[in-house]
Image (cartoon, coloured by chain):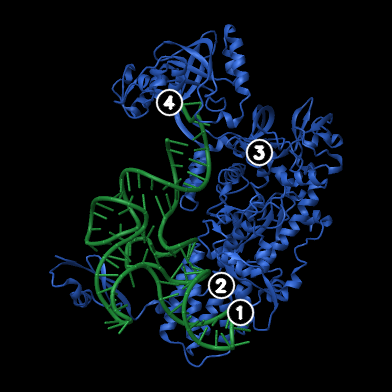
Chain colours: A blue, B green
Amino acid sequence: MALRRHRRDAPTAEAGTPRRLEATLVTVQRAVRGTRLDTLAVVTGPDEYAPHQFEDKWLARWEGATLRREGAEKRYVLTMFSYPSGDLHMGHGEVYAISDAWARFTYMRGYDVLFPVGFDSFGLPAENAAIKRGADPAQWTYANIETQSESYRRYGMAADWSRRLATSDPEYYRWTQWLFLRLFEKGLAYRRESQVNWCPNDQTVLANEQVVQGRCERCGAQVTKRSLTQWYFKITEYAQRLLDDMDLLAGQWPESVLAQQRNWIGRSEGAYVDFAIEGRADPVTVFTTRPDTLGGATFFVVAADAPLADELCAPGQREQFEAYRAQVQTLSEVERQETQREKTGVSLGVHATNPLTGEQIPVWAADYVLAEYGTGAIMAVPAHDQRDLDFARAFDLPVRVVVDTGEPDPAESGVATTGEGVHVSSGVLDGLGKDDGIAAAIAEVERAGTGRGTVIYRLRDWLLSRQRYWGAPIPVVYCPRCGEVAVPDDQLPVLLPPTSEVDLTPKGESPLATAHDWGAVDCPDCGGPARRDTDTMDTFVDSSWYFLRYCSPGLDTAPFDPEDVAAWMPARPYIGGKEHAILHLLYARFFTKALYDLGLVEVVEPFAQLINQGEVINEGRGMSKSLGNGVDLGAELTRYGVDAVRVTMLFASPPEDDIDWADVSPAGAGKWLKRVWQLAADVAAGAGRDVEPATERAVARLVDEATHLMEGHRFNVAIARCMELTNLLRKAHDAGEDARPGTEMLVTMIAPFAPYTADEAWERLGNKGFATRQDWPSVDSDLLVEDLVTCVVQVSGKVRARLEVPPSIGADELRERALAAAEAALGGRDVAKVIVRAPTLVSVVPA
RNA sequence: GCCCGGGUGGCGGAAUGGUCUACGCAGCGGCCUUAAAAGCCGCGGCCCGUGAGGGCGUUGUGGGUUCGACUCCCACCCCGGGCACCA
């Protein structure tokens, strides 16, 4: 199969070898005050619950099975694919337990389920590992993919293996390049020179989203700035749509993710205002959210590192300006972002004209104004903006109040007033409040032709070039005669050169630039000598469309078939970590909208529902090598059995909460599974008499509750109901009742969490086939009606009595009985009021 | 500073206007066993009572709405996460 070409040379995964030995052993462990003692291996007898003895059997029997159900309604259950660095870890254990439980439950509810698996296999760790060990990134990557795939199967994932993909497969990145070219044709991919984020450690540029508090998201190094010509995607053109379409996601995505994206996009309403500058033909435009305070603009500030500052600087100030700029440029992003820094700046020796007052105001350069936001220049209104006030006080510039908020004079208090107030000394605005003032000010500058209302965004275009080897080459050729030329579709993929032709050592330039033969090509347009782009794409480009490729695996005429995509998309739910809130999830939303505009897909949002699982931590902290508190997933699976670990992941907490592995009990989960397994064998041996109606009703109620809990992804509570059901059925069986129907439902219901134990117990019940292929049980609604319910009698809000009453009891009769029961608690007081909520509650209010 | 989420037993967590603490972990008592492990049964806010039972208290703090509040409203405290010189 074409998809697997790379794997020919991959070494065999190591994960499977010790398991045969373990299969004959069972581990016995004890827990003492949270510290697990050494495991002790003992040979097991025939009646011991020994998951290792049946895991391999079921794994073999499940071979090739998927959750497809031809003709049924389709559902796309999607898990964030993994980066293949080493084996699966505890975090994968949680996200996969959630995903698999949900996918299996969806199947059991009658849906045709697409549940694919793949690998986000381009990226820096492969390259860094290769440099360190002198190996090939492909070899490292594909060996890890095999290791992870083996563990993934062992974990009991019901994935559709025929759709497995890896973004580093040429069959995949061919289409990544193809999609890049479609965006290029549409003007959504473009190249420009600008100041970019540079990671000195990884020796590559970074997108804004990959800079976290001035540091590289991946390695933590302090990011610096460089001026480079790079490729960008025009995500800014989609800012408003990315905001608007969040309405479609409200209630289906976690509020925190939506809030983070809203924050990141940073919509800001205000106005552009033009200021004439002495000695310059064209005015300079500023952005402000408070055009109503224009009259209070007493100076003007340009970002010191913007070309505009250099241009505006008067000859007499040049020396001082350049010294200041040099000083600013030595600051790292981390230093510059310190919030409590003193204001610094330098006068540029020129003046601007306030378009409202006609006043001449001085122009300064400072680093508190950002070159990349707005227009890189501001009107400073010190009375009503704290930063401007701090600057004015540092350099003794005038402060003029134009909004009277009733607070002390900012010039004296040092506190800018930003709230509601009445405009003063502002001509036509005088007497207006804040919002009216803003509207009137916009109307006024528009009338005068010196400004206009506008909306700007904090979001920046997505920088996609990377100066690294292990990624998809950017399919563009530079020709001295024709300029930027797209590689024709029929010449895709632009394959990576073999590592033997490349120097991988980071040196601030792409390793591909050292592959001279690879880089020299004929221009596709004129046939003359030309050279390839030597950068590769950000791996977030790869992951922005993999969920579409899953719909049409192996297709070699297009990245995907629109009909397949229409049949499956959007994914619901999409399950993965919250660290991608403003990275992958924002990029994938943008990409889907761009592909919609290109007519390639019909959906505007790729993920109709999002589940963010929590992290698995240990002893209150994230697991890490430096802390030495890591827990190995494979070792836990060996120690407790796969199902016990899966159940622990799901039972410990709601999916979105973190799990502290020191606080939970895989041994306890195993104990429960053993009880189910033992119950199945005991029930199969037969029973003395029919099941009691009360038992039947209790079973029905628990099944019904568990079903509703599953529907809401409440796995931890659904499992609690299954445990109650186990306890109930055990008692019924021991009392001689026929617990078989209930036990069959129980065994079926644990299949999403514990597929191995479910199928094994199903077989022990004497049934053919698989519990994991059964339909989810449904209950007779007649059984959900109890014959007696408990009615609580409250006096002054406190529970004073309980009555067993038929659910059909009338309000009047219940009132009488409740009053009689409340007599002692009333102690002779008169009754002022009685609230009856038949049949469960009566509240008595004494006088 | 702005935005989002949260605070319930020794612990993980149930309960979203009506019996607070389901289910599980850890703990304690008992049964079984020569013994241990495993397994099974039971206990689990405080006080009085051998017991049945009775009294009191309780969901970060303070107030409010309500017959009734973990749940709704106001103010505050604390914890976690995101953004941040964004004009």
Tell me the mark number nearer the camera, choosing from 1 and 3: 1
Q: Are marks 4 and 1 in contact (CB under 8 Å)?
A: no
Q: CA distance from mark 1 to mark 3?
A: 54 Å
Tag 4 residue: A386
Type of amino acid at the residue the image marks with label 4: Gln
Question: Which residue sits at x=71%, y=38%?
Answer: A202
* Residue A231 found in image quarter: top right
Query: Local crowd at mark 3 within 10 Å, few (<14), some, or many (≥20)?
Result: many
Type of amino acid at the residue the image marks with label 3: Leu
Task: Determine the chain carrying the residue at label 1.
Answer: A
Labels 2 and 4 in the same subunit: yes
Tag 1 residue: A761
Left/right of residue B31 with respect to residue A497 in the rendered view = left
Question: Viewer-proximal residue, A198 or A114?
Answer: A198
**Circle 1 SS class:** helix
Tell me the mark number nearer the camera, choosing from 2 and 4: 4
The answer to whether residue A748 is seen in the rendering is: yes
Tell me the mark number nearer the camera, choosing from 3 and 2: 2
Q: Are marks 2 and 1 in contact (CB under 8 Å)?
A: yes
* Residue B46 found in image quarter: bottom left
**Circle 2 SS class:** loop
First reached walking from the N terminus: tag 1 or tag 3: 3
Type of amino acid at the residue the image marks with label 2: Ile
